[in-house]
Image (cartoon, rainbow, N blue to C red):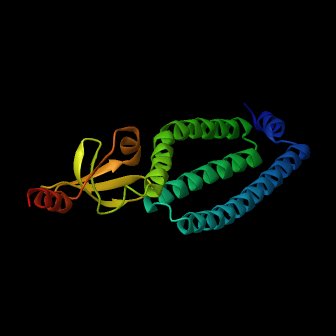
Amino acid sequence: MNVDSLFASLNQVVPDTNYWELIKSQAIGLLNKIILAAIVFFIGWLIITNFKKVFITILERGRLDKALTNLLGSVLNFAGWVIVISAIFKVLGFTEVSLAFSGSLALIAMGLASSASSVVGDLFSGVSLIADDDFQIGTRVTAAGVTGMVESIDMRKTKVRDDKGNLYIIPNKAIDNATLTILAPTKNILEEKGQKSS
């Protein structure tokens, strides 16, 4: 191979000016997409952060259980970030990945809805137990197979301490779905027996 044939083959390899213009336009387009994706990320971060704060404040004012408030806040945060990441992939031109993220959000939402049904049941049962005048803190009860004194009632669970000092934490749904026995105070029973004997 001589020098002339080498230069001739190199001239064939060197791209023309249209090729460089095409690369330049694609680089500018990619840079625009990256800038737009960064803007979407920043706006999504602002919306998620502020909306989560407002949402948790509303739940705390409603005196909802702290653990449930944190759980709902985490679910909201997760769903928000899945939407933001899906939007970023869409902006970058990865439509298939964006659709996959959206589909995963739908599947996760279905899973949370099915697992949250027990939490919702506990909440509704908690409302009915709190509203029940007979079932109060300090009342002796037999609930869900446990006999003892009610120490606390919140939206999701009730704490009952038995005569041996054991503390039972019972889901409100288990109490509401079973037979609940309100026991007369031991002191009153003894007083009544004393009055009958005299």
Which residue is at 33% across, 62% downward? Answer: 137
Q: Give the camera-side residue of 178 and 33.
A: 178
Q: Give the camera-side residue of 146 and 179.
A: 179
Which residue is at 53% across, 54% downward? Answer: 72
Q: Is residue 26 above or below residue 35?
A: above
Q: Give the camera-side residue of 190 and 163.
A: 190
Q: How many marks?
A: 0
Left or right: 97 in relation to 159: right
Which residue is at 73% across, 58% downward? Answer: 40
Q: Is residue 104 above or below residue 148?
A: above
Left or right: 78 in relation to 146: right
Rendered location of residue 52, percent (x, y): 60, 63
Left or right: 178 in relation to 195: right
Residue that lies at the very extreme toward the left in this rendered image: 197
Which residue is at 45% across, 60% downward? Answer: 65
Task: Tell me where residue 144 sits by quadrant.
Answer: top left
Q: Give the camera-side residue of 54 and 34.
A: 54
Which of the image's four quarters has the N terminus?
A: top right
Residue that lies at the very extreme toward the top in this rendered image: 1
Rendered location of residue 158, percent (x, y): 35, 54
Residue that lies at the very extreme toward the right in this rendered image: 18
Rendered location of residue 143, percent (x, y): 29, 45
Left or right: 159 in relation to 39: left
Which of the image's four quarters has the C terminus?
A: bottom left
Task: Tell me where residue 57 sits by quadrant.
Answer: bottom right
